[in-house]
Amino acid sequence: MSEHSGVTAVQASAEVRAIHRRMMRRQKLNRGLTYLVAILISLWVLVPIYFIASMALTTREAVRDYPKSVLPFIPFSTETLTFFLNSAGIVPGIINSVIVAVITLALSTLIAAPAGYAISRYIFPGRDFFRLAILAVRAFPVVILAIPLAVVFINLGIFDSVYSLALMHTALTLPTTILIIGSVFASIPYELEEAAQVFGCTPFQAFRQVVLPLVLPGIAAAAIFTFVMSWNEVFAASVLTIQNRTLPAQVLNALGQSSEPYKFAGGFFMLLPSVIFIFFIRRYLFNMWGQMTK
């Protein structure tokens, strides 16, 4: 009987070890597939950026050369970027883009901050529906909004203005800005405000002295993201402006008649701010959905 029990125990132990080995192999396989997919997605995004940068940071002759050099950035030069910046309409387009993006940033942040605080702190009937409604606004195609707004702006006498375009960009960026700022507020425990009120602060003082310093980096990240969205928007800018075009609209307007150096330099010049800004706010974007569902 003891012998049979010993054999049974050994068999059970062997089966457990075999199951453990299979689980470990499956985990390694899943981890390997995850890494492979992540690498492929990264290459899908980074390789075009790399080639655009290699063409923009060289001479115009090197851009036109065929076959291309094996080594990129050979010769390294800012000639292509200088040629792009000296092209007609580029400097005014950059100025217009900055003005529109700054106005959009200010308006979106001023409106989104109290809205994000409300949906993260207060439980009220229809809160989930309100969140979905915010997302639904972002889901509207730009063409549905841009064409009617162009007619409205013409009737009001504000068509072809950086200020009217900033209003349009504010409408486009508000949903995302509200969700990001709401996730930032949701990450701050409400108990901190309650503790400050217990020690004598008013609700406004608790918000200003305790919560606001903690959420300022997140609000700044949301503002930067808003700036990037406005900077890159092209369709509404092309429809709502003619003389006062932003940089993307100006580049799109000249794309059919432009040379390859102009195209590569334009793509690199519009892409670089986005890459830099997204790098600094990426952790807030990753946490947005998890915090908003709390």
Image: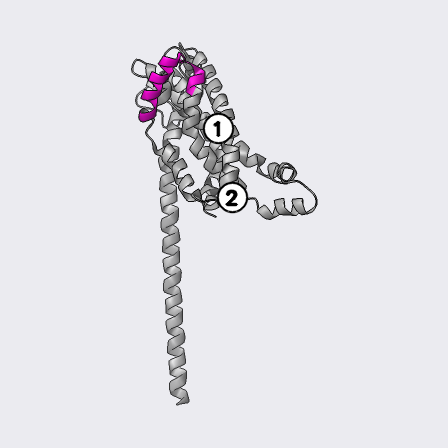
Q: In this view, does 180 lie to the left or right of 264?
A: right
Percent from the top left, x then y, of residue 57? 43, 21
In front: 168, or 127? 127
Outermost residue toward the bottom in this view: 1
Question: Residue 174 falls in which quadrant of the image?
Answer: top left
> Which residue position holds label 1?
108
In front: 251, or 76? 251
What is the span of residues highlighted in magenta in the rendered image?
Answer: 144-165
Question: Residue 93 falls in which quadrant of the image?
Answer: top left
Q: Mark number for residue 122? A: 2
Name the quadrant of the N terminus: bottom left
Badge nearest the viewer, 2 or 1: 2
Say if the magenta span includes residue 160.
yes
Q: Alpha carbon of mark 2 to alpha carbon of mark 1: how far?
A: 21 Å
Percent from the top left, x then y, of residue 254? 33, 14
Percent from the top left, x then y, of residue 100? 46, 20
Q: Which of marks 2 and 1 is nearer the N terminus?
A: 1
